Image (cartoon, rainbow, N blue to C red):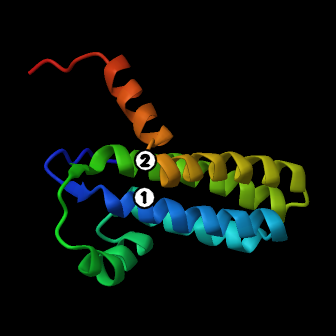
Amino acid sequence: MPDSPARTVDVRGPRFAAWVTSAVLAVVLLTASGLLAAAQAAVFAVGAAAGLRYAPYAVLFRSLVAPRLGPAREREPEAPVRFAQLVGLVFAVVGAAGYLSGAPLVGAVATGLALVAALLNAATGFCLGCELYLTVRRARPARTA
């Protein structure tokens, strides 16, 4: 996943996406639906691979919510949020695989962990995946020009 340091996003967009993701993951836990977990994994995959501009929940935010809120007063880099989408993708894939392969405990644990992270982001704005991104960036050796 290439870094895109020049791209920024309205900070309200990822929080909106986290609320929608939380709702979807809660339904996955309540219904043990591997197909819904797979659909959420697809949403994460688009955000991680293609960028937040194409992520389904970001499109919803930009077209339905943002026009009613007014202009963004705060923006953040896209790269940490995309990395967080990749982390969510891993958990959603494990959750979907667990439910679909007859291992509902694996599905529930992976989905539950993703739900906790999504709710934390939605309610407080603290993004675990973004923090993990920053930790990985700091741990990597500096590139020489």
Answer yes or no: is residue 73 visible: yes
Identify whether 132 is placed above or below 141.
below
Q: Residue at x 73, y 50 (%)?
A: 112
Question: Residue 125 got which mark?
Answer: 2
- Please give the count of numbered marks on the rendered protein: 2
Q: Residues within 10 Å of mark 2 (few under 14, many from 20)?
A: some
Q: Which amino acid, mark 1?
A: Arg
User: Which residue is at a point 37% across and 70% down the rendered structure image?
Assistant: 58
Residue type at numbered disc 2: Gly
Q: Nearer the viewer, residue 105 or 11?
A: 11
* Residue bearing mark 1: 15
Q: Can residue 51 be seen in the rendering of this structure?
A: no
| Marks 2 & 1, CB-CB < 8 Å contact | yes
Real-space CA distance between mark 2 and mark 1, rounded to the nearest whole angstrom: 6 Å
Residue depicted at x 49% and y 39% = 128
Q: Nearer the viewer, residue 24 or 70?
A: 70
